[in-house]
Amino acid sequence: MLLVHKYGGTSVGTIERIKNIAQKLARLKKEGNDLVVVVSAMGDTTDELIDLAKKISSRPSPRELDALMSTGEQISGALMAMALEDIGVPAISLTGWQAGIYTDENAGRARIKSVDPTRITEELEKGKVVVVAGFQGICDQNDITTLGRGGSDTTAVALGIALGVEKTEIFTDVKGVYTADPRIVKNARKLDIISYEEMLELASQGARVMHTRAVELGWIYNMKIEVKSSFEDEPGTIIQEVSEMEPVSRVRGIAHKKDIAKITMKHVLDKPGIAHRIFKPLGDAGINVDDIIQNASEAGYTDISFTIPIDDVDKALSILENVKRDLDIREITCNKNVGKVSIVGVGIQSTPGIAARMFGLLGEAGINIDMISTSEIKIGCIINEEDVERAVNVLHDGFGLGEE
Amino acid sequence: MLLVHKYGGTSVGTIERIKNIAQKLARLKKEGNDLVVVVSAMGDTTDELIDLAKKISSRPSPRELDALMSTGEQISGALMAMALEDIGVPAISLTGWQAGIYTDENAGRARIKSVDPTRITEELEKGKVVVVAGFQGICDQNDITTLGRGGSDTTAVALGIALGVEKTEIFTDVKGVYTADPRIVKNARKLDIISYEEMLELASQGARVMHTRAVELGWIYNMKIEVKSSFEDEPGTIIQEVSEMEPVSRVRGIAHKKDIAKITMKHVLDKPGIAHRIFKPLGDAGINVDDIIQNASEAGYTDISFTIPIDDVDKALSILENVKRDLDIREITCNKNVGKVSIVGVGIQSTPGIAARMFGLLGEAGINIDMISTSEIKIGCIINEEDVERAVNVLHDGFGLGEE
C-alpha cells in the first residue's frame, strides 16, 4: 500500500528522532508498503533562519525569506533520506520544486496550484522511499515559495490527493484532536473521528493541531487525514466526511485563543462600502481579521469591532490611522487583553438551547462576554484574556465532553 | 560595466561582514555598474552540515550530501540579497539551478557543463543586483549537485564567461597570490600578475588561494581572474595569459604541501598495464594521486611510489590490499611524515641551472630529498614533513623572491 506520512518539526527535531522515524519507516517498507514522507524543518530551524534574516533587515522581502526558510526542510529531508539509506532502505529526498509542487506567487503564504507527481512516482517505482521537503513549492517565475506556517501539512495532503491514497497521516507531538486543549483541561478526551468543518473551526479557533489549509484541501478532495503521535504507536484522530444522517448536533470540542487583540472603530459613518474600505487594506497587508461585529451607535453612525492576531496590532493600527483620516472616524481603540472561547460541533448553531446554555455556563462562572460570533458549527465568545482557561474548563464540563 | 564578484566563506562569515559587502556593492551599483555576486556558505556552515550528516550516517550518499550542503550557499545568498534590499538596492538571490548552472551527475564533484544566464540577464535588466549561490548546479536528472570544495570560484568564473565580462573578481581573505605562503615566509611578496599555468601549479602544490578548476576554466576561455582581499580596497593578483615573448623563465613562487603521505609498492612485476591496474581503482575511488615515481628494482620488477592526500590513506591502503593480492606485489609501505616543496615558473624546467640550484639550496640546508617530480613549469621535491617550512624559506631567499 502507498502511504503518505508527514512528520512535524518536533518529530524530526533531533538526529536521534530522525533515526527513530527511519527505523519505523524501514519496518513499514519491509512489510511491503511504498512510502512518501513529508518532513518539516528540524525543531526551531525556521525560527533561527527568521532570526538571521531579522538581523540583516527589519523588513526582509518575502521572496528572499522564502529562499532562506525553504532550506530548513531541504536539510531535514536530506538527513531523513541519509538515515534511511544508512539502514539499508533505498531513499531519495526531493525539494518542493523537485517534487512537483506548483504554487501561486504569494511569497510566504503561497497556495498550491497543482501537483505533478511524476518524479515521485518514478522514484517509488525504483523502490525508493521518497522524502519530500514540506512547506515549499515553486511558482511560475521559477522562484521558491513557502506555504506559510504549518504548510508541511498542506504539502502532505496535496501529495496524498495527487498520489490517490485513501488517507494522509500527519505525525505530530500530540496524540490527536482533543475535545479541548489537554494542557488546560485535565479530562480532555481524544476524538476518534471529526468532520472537516469541525476541525476547521477548532483549528481556526486556536487548536494548533493542523494547518487550516490542509484541512480545507482534504475537505474539497474528500481526503481522509489522520492526526497521530510520532512517538506512540496508536490510532489518532481521523478527519473525514461525517454522514449528515448521524445525530451529531452536539458540542464536539472547545477551542480557545489568547494571542488576539480587539480593535474598535467608533463613530463610523454608516454607508455602503465602508466595511470594504476598512478591511480591504488589512487583507492586502496579510492580516487575518477574525470576528467582526457592527453596532449602530447613533443615527447614521456605527461602531465596528473586530479581532486580529496580537502580532499584527502595530501593522493594523498604522494602516487604520490612514483609514481613520480618510473616513473621518472618531476614535480607534485597541484592547490586547482579550481572548476567545468557542464551542464547536456540526449543527449546534441551529440546535435550540445550545447557545443559551453556553452563555449560561459562562454567566454562572462570573465570566463576562464582550462579543459573540457564530457560524454554522461554532459559537464563539470574546472574553477577558485571564478568564480563558477557566471558561474552557467550565464549558468542557458543562457540555459533558470528558465523558465517553 | 557588468562586474562579476565572488565572496568566500570568511568574507560572508558574519551578519556584519555581509552588511559591509552590501555597502560596498551599493556604492559600485550607484556608480553605474551592474553586478552579479557569487557567494559561498557563511564561515563553517558547510562543515557543520557535513557534521550533521556524519551523525546520521558514516557514509552518507553523495546525492543527499549535495542536497544538504547546497543549502549553505542558498542561505548566504538570500541574506546578501536582503542586506542589499535593506539599504535600498534592488536585489535577488538565485540558487544554482535558478541561475542556469548545468552540471554533470558527479555528486560532490560535479563539473559545469553549460551555463544558461537567461534569468540572470533578465534580473540585471530589471536593475537588480543578482546574488548567485556558489558551489552548486543542477544535473540532467534535476538533482542538485555541488562542485567540490572551493567550487564557488568555478561558479564565478563560469558566470563571468557566460556573461562576457572582461574579468572575474574573487574576493577572499588574502590579498592575492604570494611568492610563498606569507604565514611561513616573512618577506613573501604579492604578485601583480601570474599566468594560469603557474597559478595551477601553485594551487595544486598547496597554495589554497583558488579552486583549481576555476583557474582551468579561466585558462580555457581566457577569462582574467583577479584574486583580492574582501577587507581591503587594493588591487590583488590578476591571473591571466602571459605573453610567451616575455623573458619569464624564472621562479615565480614557492608552493608547499604538508598533508600528504607517500605510498611505496615494492617488487611489482614490471609489465605493460600494471600501472593502470594500480591507479585505476584509486582514481575510481576519487583519490587524487600526485607525484608518481617508478624505479627498476631487480630485473623484471619495479618499485612504484606516489603521494596522496593524507586523508585518503586508509581508503587507498584498503584498495591497494586487493591490488597487492591480484598482482603479487611483495610489500606496501606508507610514510605519513612527508611533505612537498615546489618551485613554480613558466619555462623553469627547460632553463639550465634552475633545478640544480634548487637541489643545491636544499642540500646546503641539510634537507634530504626523497623524491623529485617535474612538470613544464614546476620542480617539486618530496622531503621530510618537518623540513617543509625551512625549505620554503630557503628557496624563497635563494631565488630572490622577496625582492621586487
Image: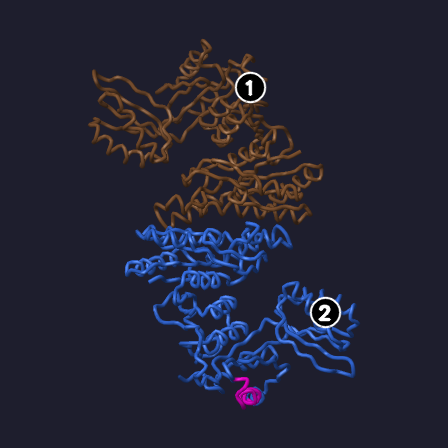
Chain colours: A brown, B blue
Front position in the image: A386 or B371: B371
Residue B44 coordinates in the image, percent (x, y) = 50, 58
Q: Is residue B356 magenta?
A: yes
What residue occupies the far top of the structure in this picture?
A: A352
For label 1, the residue is A242
Residue B70 coordinates in the image, percent (x, y) = 51, 53
Say what amino acid the circle numbered 2 marks. Arg
Q: Quadrant of the C terminus of chain A?
A: top right
Q: Quadrant of residue B263?
A: bottom right
Front position in the image: A334 or B6: B6
Residue at 55% across, 55% down = B145
Residue A134 coordinates in the image, percent (x, y) = 52, 40
Residue at 35% across, 35% down = A312
Q: Image check: A253 left or right of B190?
A: right
Residue B345 coordinates in the image, percent (x, y) = 50, 81
Label 2 crowding class (10 Å Cα cut-off): few <14, some 14-19, many 20+? few
Secondary structure at numbered mark 2:
helix
Q: Is residue B119 magenta?
A: no
Label 1 crowding class (10 Å Cα cut-off): few <14, some 14-19, many 20+? some
Is the same chain shared between marks 2 and 1? no
Front position in the image: B394 or B283: B283
Residue at 48% across, 75% down = B181
Say what amino acid the circle numbered 1 marks. Val
Secondary structure at numbered mark 1:
loop
Residues in magenta, as a range = B348-360
Chain label for disc 2: B
For label 2, the residue is B277
